[in-house]
Image (spheres, rainbow, N blue to C red):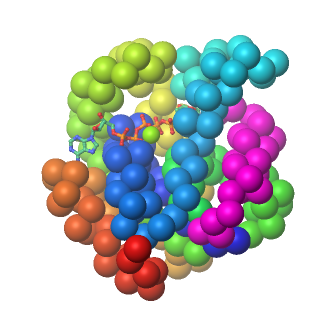
Amino acid sequence: MRSLICLGGPGSGKGTQCAKIVEAFGFTHLSAGELLRREIYSNSKKGEMIRDTIKEGKIVPSDVTVSLIKREIQASENDKFLIDGFPRSEDNRVAFEHIIGAEPELVLFLECPEEEMIRRVLNRNQGRIDDNIETIEKRLKVFNKLNFPVINYYDAKGKLRKISAVGTIEEVFEKIKPQFSAYKET
Ligand code: UP5
Ligand code: MG
């Protein structure tokens, strides 16, 4: 199993760029946020807890997210995964590496100014319960406090690739592409 990770603040463009990477390089896209949102609507026991956590911009317990990711990996015939928006904390990272038993080959980090992230999220209009200014401010705080230790960890291991997320969707993708020179275009 080979995995790449895409990190960045709320609205930095992870989902948008991951969709393009997947199309160009044949990865399976696993968005942790999407898997959690799907769980809310599946009437599972954990759905209510997940909804409350997302509404508060907090991080869902690692075992819940990791088991959703693991289920997708096991159900897939692909062996290349692009994980979007996870791990968001050191606790997430350790749980992932312990349970999945692998470290990512590469970690993309989409760097975006906060005002731009807020603007993108507020313009999204997809009815997400966390796309309001109160929750966005909480999401940004949690991102700054808990995701940076993970980003620094991968940086120290030489796995981090910082990409400026400013510019059009195509311009950002052009900056990402060279990072994938080792992966075959599909
Ligand atoms: N857009 C994208 N690129 C653009 C560009 N270059 N120029 C102009 N506009 C651009 O993009 C956001 C919006 O901006 C879109 O409308 C897009 O068209 C436009 P998107 O690609 O959706 O950005 P993304 O980084 O994916 O933003 P998202 O809001 O999904 O990021 P979050 O990290 O906040 O959300 P996620 O879904 O990952 O998590 C949601 C919540 O789930 C978390 O806050 C947390 O509570 C919980 N969660 C966990 O607890 N654990 C996890 O592991 C994951 C999530
Ligand atoms: Mg997203």
- Magenta region includes residue 37: no
Q: Residue at x 30, y 27 (%)?
A: 124
Can you tell which quarter of the image residue 52 is in? top right
Look at 36% across and 17% down and name the residue there: 133
- Tell me which residue sits at (51%, 64%) in the image: 27
From this view, report whether residue 56 is shown above or below residue 97: above
Q: Position of residue 59 (x, y in %)?
A: 64, 33
Q: Is residue 163 left or right of residue 167?
A: right
Magenta region: 58-80
Quarter of the displayed picture in which ligand 2 can be seen: top left
Expressed as whole percent of the image width and height from the top left, the position of residue 123 reads 25, 25
Instruction: Report the side of 4 relative to 95 (left or right).
Output: left
Q: Is residue 51 above or below residue 16?
A: above
Residue 107 in view here: no
Quadrant (top left/top right/bottom left/bottom right) for the C terminus: bottom left
Above or below: residue 109 compared with residue 16 = below
State how many labels appear. Answer: 0
Q: Quadrant of the N terminus?
A: bottom right
Judge whether residue 17 can be spotted in this image. Answer: yes
Residue placed furthest toward the bottom: 182
Could you tell me residue 58's position as x and y percent? 61, 28
The residue depicted at 52 percent of the width and 79 percent of the height is 158
Residue 18 placement (x, y as % from top left): 42, 54
Q: Is residue 78 magenta?
A: yes
Secondary structure character of the magenta stretch overall: helix
Q: Is residue 49 left or right of residue 53?
A: right
Q: Nearer the viewer, residue 25 or 143?
A: 25
Q: Quadrant of residue 170?
A: bottom left
